[in-house]
Amino acid sequence: MKVFVTGVGGQLGHDVMNELSRRGYEGIGSDIHPVYSGIQDGSAVTAMPYIGLDITDKDAVLAAVEESAPDVIVHCAAWTNVDGAEDPVKQPLVHKINVEGTQNMADAAKAVDAKIIYLSTDYVFDGQGERPWQPDDKNYAPLNYYGQTKLEGELAISETVDKYFIVRIAWVFGLNGKNFIKTMVNVGKTHDTVRVVNDQIGTPTYCYDLARLLVDMAETDKYGYYHATNEGGYISWYDFTKEIYKQAGMDTKVIPVTTEEYGLSVAARPFNSRLDKSKLKEAGFTSLPDWKDAVARYLKEADL
């Protein structure tokens, strides 16, 4: 199986490439930079083929995919700065990357008859209530511009190709890049107390575990919409932070506050990021491990 992966300079793309290598598959990595820009950790991603690719360049995308002739495309590349996406000056670029770029990948997948796996987000929903979102829910109402562009990306995929997996994730952390755990550990080293919201509820997603699931999916034809976060129940960012400090052996005090009291975010954030993952088991896929176990493995791997 040959797999073309976008966004390998980021957290998830990096881990997908390494998972492909572990299983003996051929991975072709791509990202916006002329040469691989992620961490040089000696892992397989740095030794596998790499293509500098601007996904907003339709002709370049088609040429790269046709030349590579992959069986599967894993589309991880995206604009992910949620607050930055609220800047009217930046919004044309956000749309170009998340919508037009995704359309280009969908068109390329169709041209070579490849499966495509698209990473989406709970932000496509309105983030209200307490009922966990189902993969096949269609009552979309994104709270912010980032969520709107990711929804339009979903539609670009589903309306262009038949062989697709749309996988919604939340609260992502991985080795290659910035994430909540790294931020909180660094803040905890210089602050005696931290304020963290306790009214936004969801579950973390460890890229290492998610990468395994995505390759599992690529091996099948069980297409459709899925939700994929780690197991272990629904928690708040406050709960998440408490566990991070506990496992890291830090005594930083965590003070719970409401989203309104916190008041620092530019973009509206969902209160309800609960994603129902039961469809994974129904389709025969192995669930991701407990999030506390994922935190422990990540802290060790990242040497935090």
Image (spheres, rainbow, N blue to C red):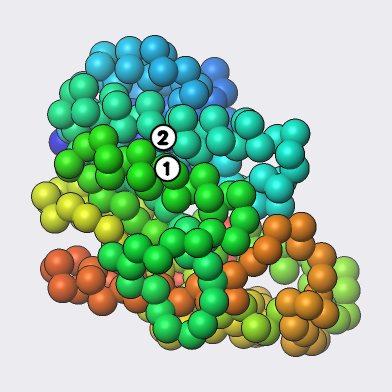
Counting from the top left corner in percent of width and height, residue 123 is at 52, 61
Which picture quadrant has residue 135? bottom left
Camera sees residue 280? yes
Q: Which mark is residue 162?
A: none
Q: Residues within 10 Å of mark 2 (few under 14, many from 20)?
A: many
Q: Are marks 1 and 2 in contact (CB under 8 Å)?
A: yes
Give the labeled residue for mark 2.
Answer: 102
Left or right: 101, with 39 as reference point: left
Q: Residues within 10 Å of mark 1 (few under 14, many from 20)?
A: many
Counting from the top left corner in percent of width and height, residue 89 is at 75, 34
Left or right: 45, with 212 as reference point: right
Give the labeled residue for mark 1.
Answer: 153
Q: Amino acid at mark 1?
A: Gly
Counting from the top left corner in percent of width and height, residue 29 is at 39, 30
In this figure, what is the number of numbered marks? 2
Q: Secondary structure at mark 2?
A: helix
